[in-house]
Amino acid sequence: MKEARLFSRRSSTLPMNRITDIHPDHSFFGRLLNFGDLFIYTAGEGGFELVMEKIPGPGDVEATIESRLLETKKNS
């Protein structure tokens, strides 16, 4: 989910089986303070990129999503 402005919210949902790549990005200070952006890419025509900006622990979020992806693949 990406939130914009003070009084509005924009969210996106994507199926786990369509995620093809996850990439965390931290600045120097982001690494020191454990925050950054997380880019999630999907398969399909035109693809899709979801960007989660300035989130705490982007590496932890990436690990959680990848763990869920493995569980989803095992169960299919």
Image (cartoon, rainbow, N blue to C red):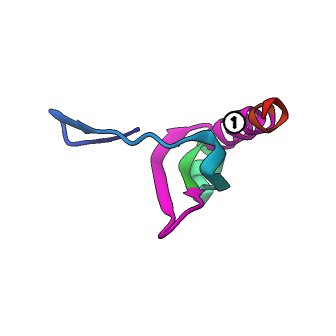
66 sits to left or right of 18: right
Q: Looking at this view, is 29 or 39 the one in front?
A: 39
Q: Nearer the viewer, residue 6 or 49?
A: 49
Is 61 on the left or on the right of 46, as rendered? Answer: right
Q: Quadrant of the C terminus?
A: top right
Q: Position of residue 55 (x, y in %)?
A: 50, 40
* Picture coordinates of residue 25, whole percent (x, y): 60, 57
Check disc 1 and report the residue beneath it: 60
Q: Is residue 57 left or right of residue 66?
A: left
Number of marks in the rendered image: 1
Q: Helix, strand, or loop for circle 1?
A: helix
Q: The residue under label 1 is which amino acid type?
A: Asp
Given residues 36 and 74, the one toward you in this image is: 74
Q: Residue at x 74, y 41 (%)?
A: 66
Q: Quadrant of the N terminus?
A: top left
Residue at 50% across, 68% down: 45
Q: Residue furthest bottom?
A: 46
Residue 21, quarter of picture = bottom right
Quadrant of the image occupied by residue 59: top right
Relative depth, front residue between 20 and 64: 20
Residue 52 position within the rendered picture, expressed as x and y whole percent measured from the top left: 47, 47
Please tell me which residue is depicted at 45% across the width and 49% down the height of the picture.
53
| 21 shown above or below 66 | below
> Over which residues does the magenta segment extend?
41-70
Q: Residue furthest left?
A: 7
